[in-house]
Image (cartoon, rainbow, N blue to C red):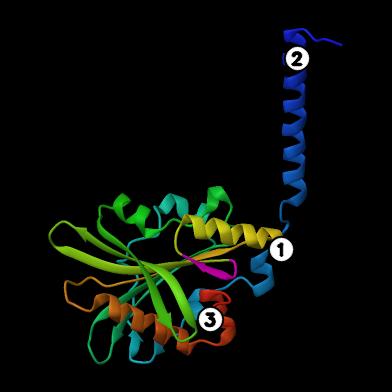
Amino acid sequence: MLFKPSQIKNHLLALALIFMLGSVALAEMVKPRKYWADVIGEPHYSTLIPMQFGDWQAIPNGGKTMVNPVQEENLMRLYSETFARSYRNARTKRVIMLSIAYGRDQANDTQLHTPEACYPSQGFRVESRTEHTVASKFGPLESVQLMTTMGARRTEPLTFFIRVGDEVARGSRDRNLARVKMALRGYRVDGMLFRVSEVTKRDGAYELQDQFINDLLGSLSPEGRRRIIGSVGT
């Protein structure tokens, strides 16, 4: 039987519609229903992170002048918890600012915002970006180092990494891959942005930040570390 061109076009459109509806139905069927946060427990970083560890002592009200992860109006939509605290090193007297942003659901429209996006939105300029691996004794942590400035008066080098589900991720590709892996296990992933920075033009800023990260991780229980770096090192 021969079909007229108009009939062929109509058949193709019908097949395309059936395929689209089937794809939507399949996506809905395999969409994860369980939250990874319910497995490991939703963290509360204000109580998890100690006020003192190693040579580091928290500074009272030291988190009030930090750069927010995102603008204030987006905080409630994107994050379940935000945490900021500053620490002074007893030996060097240098101050490290720690900021954590946690989101229970890392869907596309509620993913964590990285400093590469939020710093420029608050008047900073990103001078350089370097992919970096923090050599922790619990395993390598894929991270990013940024050099940021605000005019001629403020220079703020920083290091950040992201936990997605049970993995540490650096960029968008790693984040999406980690999210897919957890989806195949049946979970909607949570996510945590971990950032340390220092307002300084002195040498050794990134080395000090690596030391801070290692000192902090070493002060936590295995369960506490998992809420920071996932299953790295386990």
Q: Earlier in the sequence, mark 1 or mark 2?
A: 2
52 in the magenta segment = no
Work out how far the residue at label 1 is from the one at label 2, CA to CA, in angstroms.
41 Å
Q: Is mark 3 on a helix, strand or loop?
A: helix
Above or below, 205 against 22 in this view is below
Secondary structure, magenta segment, majority class: strand
117 or 70, nearer to the observer: 117
Q: What residue type is labelled 3?
A: Arg
- Could you tell me if the residues under marks 2 and 3 are in contact, i.e. CB atoms within 8 Å? no
Q: Which amino acid does label 1 sit on?
A: Arg
Look at mark 1 in the image and give the residue it sits on: 185
Work out how far the residue at label 1 is from the one at label 3, CA to CA, in angstroms.
22 Å
Q: In this view, does 204 lie to the left or right of 59?
A: left
Work out how far the residue at label 2 is from the one at label 3, CA to CA, in angstroms.
60 Å
Magenta stretch bounds: 165-169
Look at mark 2 in the image and give the residue it sits on: 8
Q: Is residue 43 left or right of residue 123?
A: right
Residue in view at x 50 percent, y 56 percent: 173
Above or below, 212 against 170 in this view is below
Q: Is residue 113 left or right of residue 185?
A: left
Look at mark 3 in the image and give the residue it sits on: 225
Residue in view at x 46 percent, y 87 percent: 137
> Is residue 55 in sight in this rendering?
yes
